[in-house]
């Protein structure tokens, strides 16, 4: 049933609206809604930029055939889409991108033995802190007035004063 | 707010630092001079004007009585920031809060929580959270002849150059919680004045009994880590990203857990002893 649905309604991944900045071999993406910043390597970036919501996975693979030397096989694109979906960089309107239909990194490695590891898609994600978390914090036993001021994250009563506690 | 004004309206002043106007008022005019040493580096006093934040100090000078505790307090606008019997705690908290506020609101600079030293005409930036060992590493670089820029903030301008933010270094003594303040001169170094382009970003964290085996990191990873320590990253991500990308252009980045700080300094001396090579644009 699921297979029939897939055939009739092929997956057309669409990237989210985000702030992107291209570097030499990477793309940095800032997700304003979740305040997460992602670093996409060359392969992941190429796939993400092609995810316009109109192209299907085989179509994206075909477009990237030459730059990524994947010989028409969409295995890398599928892995990249799974990773991008997991990182929240694709809109999940019609399907989940991290489902069983997408291959694992191990499966991909089996299929592309000859390919250099460097072409495997990689997405590194980091949460951007609030200014309070980016700031310096107080050590233990320093007088405090709220939890954010303490490195331990715990401002509590000791005697009659509020101090940073473990 | 009016009640607070009646309490602390004895004296006050306004200053501007990195494009942010801040006001301070106190109930004891004598402490205003002492507070000036806690203002951000490079501040300029200004006449009375609209400020972005107003700090109010209430120092309790009433006669000590038995079984009555004498509290001092500092307010940020109308909110109590800290109430303590120790006056110095108030100044420490003011310094921490005003620095964070300016770092977040500055319209002219991007502030990253990082240690910075000048080395062979370039800046070495060590981003990291509190207690990650930034100040210890900065101190070790100073002993090795580097110029002091900051142990707290890397202040980037529009071109991606790093400016000094030179408060005395806050060094935590092992097994003790309090910090001791030391100037760059105490390490036989001097404080930098000129803005520098970034030469090296070191992504590291102290871990006891570890040894430093650095790996090269990509520019993307370096910017990711800098952004994760940037104060205005949430409020103005576009500007932060643009400036950090510019700052990282042609720089080196080393990553890895470190043990003793001198291992890191030795690596930098070996690799960049004479000068920094600039990675060419591809």
Image (cartoon, grey):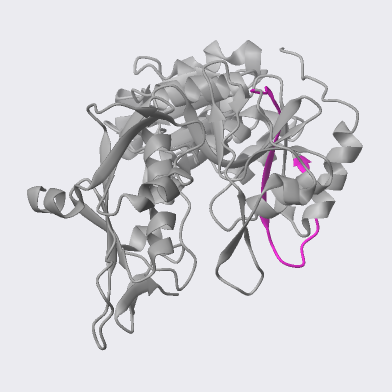
Please tell me whether residue A37 is drawn above or below residue B33 in the rendered image: above
Q: Residue A126, position in %: x, y? A: 48, 42
Q: Quadrant of the C terminus of chain B?
A: top right
What residue span does the magenta drawing correspond to? B195-215
Residue B2 appears in the picture as rendered: yes
Q: Residue at x 32, y 76 (%)?
A: A161
Residue B198 among those drawn in magenta: yes
> Magenta span has B12?
no
Residue A58 in sight in this render: no
The vertical placement of B247 against A124, above or below, is above
Q: Is residue B12 left or right of residue B106?
A: left
**Residue, x 56% and y 36% (percent of image)?**
B165
B251 sits left or right of B61 in the view: right
Q: Nearer the viewer, residue A158 or B132?
A: A158
Depth check, front residue: B73 or B201: B73
Q: Position of residue A72 (x, y in %)?
A: 60, 18
> Could you tell me residue B153's position as x and y percent?
55, 39
B83 or B37: which is nearer to us?
Answer: B37
**Looking at the image, is B266 positioned above or below residue A31?**
below
Choose between B190 and A8: the one closer to the eye: B190
Please determine whether, in this image, residue B182 is positioned above or below residue A68.
below
Coordinates of residue A41 in the picture (x, y in percent): 60, 28
- In the drawing, does residue B116 fall left or right of residue B238? right
């Amino acid at each position: 049933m699921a297979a029939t649905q897939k055939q009739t309604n092929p997956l057309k991944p669409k990237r989210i609206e985000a702030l992107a900045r291209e570097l030499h071999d990477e793309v940095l993406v800032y997700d304003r809604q979740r305040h997460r910043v992602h670093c996409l390597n060359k392969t992941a970036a190429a796939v993400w930029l092609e995810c316009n919501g109109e192209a299907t996975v085989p179509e994206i693979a075909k477009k990237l055939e030459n730059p990524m030397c994947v010989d028409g096989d969409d295995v890398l694109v599928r892995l990249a889409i799974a990773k991008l979906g997991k990182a929240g960089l694709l809109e999940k309107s019609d399907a989940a991108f991290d489902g069983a239909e997408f291959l694992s990194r191990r499966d991909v490695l089996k299929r592309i033995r000859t390919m250099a590891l460097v072409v495997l898609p990689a997405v590194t994600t980091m949460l951007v802190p609030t200014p309070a978390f980016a700031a310096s914090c107080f050590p233990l036993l320093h007088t405090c007035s709220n939890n954010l001021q303490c490195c331990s994250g715990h401002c509590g009563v000791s005697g009659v004063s509020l101090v940073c506690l473990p | 707010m009016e009640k607070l004004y009646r309490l602390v309206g004895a004296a006050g002043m306004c200053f501007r630092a990195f494009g942010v106007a801040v006001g301070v008022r106190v109930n004891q005019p004598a402490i205003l001079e002492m507070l000036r040493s806690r203002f951000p580096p490079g501040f300029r006093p200004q006449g009375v004007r609209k400020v972005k934040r107003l700090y109010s100090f209430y120092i309790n000078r009433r006669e000590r009585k038995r079984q009555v505790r004498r509290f001092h307090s500092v307010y940020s606008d109308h909110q109590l920031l800290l109430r303590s019997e120790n006056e110095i705690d108030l100044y420490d908290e003011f310094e921490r809060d005003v620095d964070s506020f300016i770092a977040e609101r500055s319209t002219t600079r991007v502030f990253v929580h990082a240690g910075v030293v000048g080395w062979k005409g370039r800046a070495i930036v060590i981003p990291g959270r509190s207690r990650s060992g930034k100040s210890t590493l900065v101190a070790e670089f100073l002993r090795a002849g580097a110029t002091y820029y900051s142990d707290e903030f890397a202040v980037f301008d529009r071109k991606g150059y790093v400016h000094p933010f030179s408060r005395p270094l806050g060094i935590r003594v092992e097994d003790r919680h309090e910090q001791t303040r030391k100037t760059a001169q105490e390490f036989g170094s001097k404080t930098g004045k000129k803005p520098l382009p970034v030469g090296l970003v070191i992504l590291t964290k102290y871990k006891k009994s570890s040894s430093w085996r650095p790996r090269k990191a990509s520019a993307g990873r370096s910017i990711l880590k800098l952004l994760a320590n940037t104060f205005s990253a949430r409020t103005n991500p576009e500007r932060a990203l643009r400036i950090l990308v510019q700052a990282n252009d042609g720089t080196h980045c080393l990553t890895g857990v470190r043990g003793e700080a001198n291992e890191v300094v030795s690596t930098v001396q070996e690799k960049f002893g004479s000068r920094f090579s600039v990675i060419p644009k591809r």
